[in-house]
Amino acid sequence: MGERVFLLDGTALAYRSYFAMKEPLRDSKGRNTTAIYGVVNSILKIMREEKPEYMIVAFDAGKPASRLQIFPEYKSTRVKMPDELKEQIPILKQVLEAMGISVVELEGEEADDVVATLTCQAKELGFEPVIVTADKDFFQLIDDKTKILQPGKWSMPSKWWDKNNAIERLGVPPERIVDLLAIMGDTSDNIPGISGIGEKGAQKLINEFESLDNIYLNIDKIPTKVKDRLIEGKESAYLSRELIRLKTDLPVKFEPERAKIQKMRTDELFELFKELEFHSLLKEFGFEELKKAKGEYRVVCSIEELEELSKRIKELGYFAIDLETDSLSPIDAHIVGISISLEEGKGYYIPVGHNVGSGLIKTQYSNLDLKSVLKLIKELVENKDIAKIGQNVKYDMLVLENYDIHLQNCGFDTMVASYLIDPGSHQHSLDYIAMRYLNYKMTTYKDVTKSGKKEIPFADVPIEVACEYSAEDADIALRLSNFFAPKLREYNLERVFHDVEIPLIFVLASMERAGIKIDTEVLRAFADEIQKRITVCEQEIYELAGERFNINSPAQLRTILFEKLRLPSTKKTKTGASTDVDVLEKLAEHHPLPKKIVEYRSYSKLLSTYFESLIKLVNPRTGRIHTSFNQVNTATGRLSSSDPNLQNIPVRGEFGREIRKAFVPEPGNIFISADYSQIDLRLLAHLSCDPVLIQAFEKDKDIHRTTASLILNKPIDEITPEDRRIAKTVNFGIIYGLSPYGLSQELNIEVDKAKEFIDNYFRTYQRTKQFIEEIKEFAHKNGYVQTILGRRRYLPEINSENKNTRAFAERIAINTSVQGSSADLIKVAMINIHRELGERGRMILQVHDELLFEVKEEYVDELKELIRDRMENAMRLSVPVKADIGVGRNWFEAHP
């Protein structure tokens, strides 16, 4: 056996990789790097599994002159290579060459012809070529020496093709594939073949007559219908054969020494991967340690040493801080250690809660006296002249409050800065942003506490180990603050960062600390009622099914619905026919059982999601639920909440009503709920300067009735509730960028009718239409959109070649401009109200456009007016802003 040489069509592989991911891979500058990443990983897979010593990657170079000369329409139906893919090809070549892999291209020739030529030459020199491809054209090259390795999709295994099994792919031996394709054509390359003869017909002809020439020599033996098509398509067949036959005589030379995989140019490859932000590949290639500048971290061993550190901090006027605790819940956490950094590359660790005397850990250090440490820390943290820097400062702020230490002057939060710079990213952890922006691989929490059965609490980590981990956190937070600060200036995000997002941290911390009381008796009573309904529902399901079965088992439910009841299966999953809610609602037209299943699932979800989980989340120490408000989770700038997600609690309906009744104030307090009225539409009016929309709000008209009258051409006093519902859907649909099809689905009407509504809307609100087009134009030009305060959202797909992808990005652009501005407005209102509440009350919840306050009863009237005023005057808009206010003994009662 000769040496194997692996030959790849780099252009085809790049195409395949580029279109393989639904969500493209992008770096922090917004550049698409999907194709490069995909090709490199494909090659790495080959290297791991096949351990090749020789490899060549060929690329297209220019237009295929010879084929275009004989057939100008060759590949004319192919979509032009997307610009984002084209930009990756030169970088991909650099990466491959840095990996030690030979890259070949020939001007005016296609990569597959280059591969074919090199394959023939390699065989002559005693090599066994392996062509890595999924392209059927290459099967014509398979012989005793040449094989094909077809890469598997995703995690699927690759498949080998050789002379023995190649017939399975196209139904004919490799040597007959050119003639087969000449007859059946190839739509992907716009090769015509013979009209009316498909794959099966072509296979039958080739297997019977062996070649295209023999078919025409025996044309009279062929049935008339096929014969006529063959005669009519003869010229096309021979032309197609010329187009399909790969060239094996190009002026390119197979040189074994060049084909041999060379030693990687590690420095060059490292810089390329760093620039491309391929963090996983940096790790894969063992580069993660190359650029890790070891910090100088030390344990603070005495109070005197801490006092000296404190003096330096006061002189500097800033420091980075990070706490190590024993709980992820900040209001329950106890401090184990405190880390501080004053300059990049240096950090200090103050141990206060390690289990030093337990005998569980061996360490040369001791804890410092907690009380003495906290006294000094309190002086620093509460000093308004000293800026505090950190990652997720809200957590540290809440923990410090457990010790009556109240942080003043948050100078920088790296998590929030990362979010503002790239709100589309789902990753803002310190580990991630350190790797992304500093190319720094941090020590992880699991590195020091282990995981699984070997996991230990942080208090059991030796102090010297804890120091390296924790001081690094403070150091990296400081480094990142220095990195992000000029970026915020560059992107004009300083105002929204310092005037909105940083002050908001204090508001959210206060809300989390306050929590909200739950009347567990009310919740349990309704949970009992839901359980009764579930039991009744179960019995009705068993009766309709004619037997008992596990309702929660999709497999058993499929058996009942599609085998026993023989209901039509409309949607498939990997495991069988789908039983999701959309399918069940359609099946309900044929039988009552599916409707009962939907009802059962609804009750079960209510019980587990709201009633059972809410009771479990009541803090036993405070008797209240302390949700976490997430500042960096949504691309529009809106807040979200978790543990529990209070944004998802229904507003309307029996269930939403009963759940909200369980949220109650403490004795002597009362709830005030304030809800912005149609704030998105008011902001649309302001941002678009639409005179018709502005006038409607200035005159305090019902905007949905007004729109209904205008788009339906009906007098306003004749507008029905259904008309208003249609107009409301259209009004908000415009903000969400709904297409006529999308609106037709929302309203269950014909697409033409939905288009008519949208056209009428824009004839009425003409400036709104112009504003939307201006947003799209700005987004296409700049790659991002902005909110009223300058918050950015990047839209990587805004200039996509794919029409649907591009349209989706345009809808996001419109929605973000309006909803993101709404988020800005309510955040400003929250900050202003929080500053003035004092001891009279507390802001406890923010859900979409609603704020909930728990206030002392004697202040309810004055606070109602304060809240209304600050919400309605948070920003100066060209339309009146309206906040509806309600008061009540529970959340449901208070909702206006």
Image (spheres, helix red, strand yellow):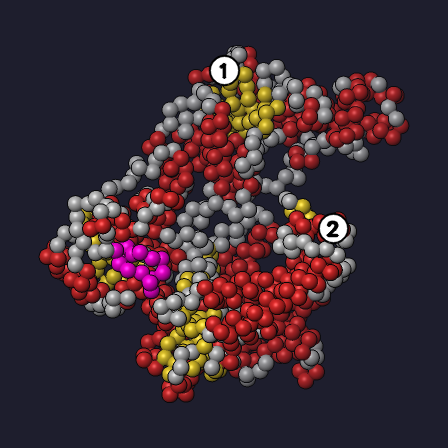
711 up-or-down from 571: above or below: below
Spatial separation of the CA atoms under disc 1 and disc 2: 56 Å
Image coordinates for residue 889, horizontal then vertical, percent: 47, 82
Helix, strand or loop at label 2? It is helix
Q: Is residue 500 visible?
A: no
Q: Give amino acid for label 1.
A: Glu
Do the numbered discs 1 and 2 sit on residues whose CB atoms are within 8 Å? no
In the picture provided, is 232 more to the left or to the right than 330? Answer: right
Comparing 732 with 350, the one in front is 350
Dot 1: within a 10 Å radius of its alpha carbon, few (fewer than 14), some, or many (20 or more) residues? some
104 up-or-down from 591: above or below: above
Comparing 402 with 582, the one in front is 402
In the picture provided, is 700 more to the left or to the right than 410? Answer: right
Residue 562 image label: 2
Image coordinates for residue 268, horizontal then vertical, percent: 35, 33
Disc number lying in front (1 or 2) = 2
Comparing 220 with 164, the one in front is 164
In the picture provided, is 883 more to the left or to the right than 835? Answer: right
597 up-or-down from 73: above or below: below
The magenta stretch is 323-336
Dot 2: within a 10 Å radius of its alpha carbon, few (fewer than 14), some, or many (20 or more) residues? few
Image coordinates for residue 271, horizontal then vertical, percent: 35, 37
At x 63%, y 68%, the residue is 533
In the picture provided, is 629 more to the left or to the right than 342? Answer: right
Does the magenta segment cover residue 327? yes
Does the magenta segment cover residue 201? no
Residue 139, by quadrant, is top right
At x 47%, y 38%, the residue is 37
- Name the residue that disc number 1 marks: 3
Comparing 256 with 213, the one in front is 256
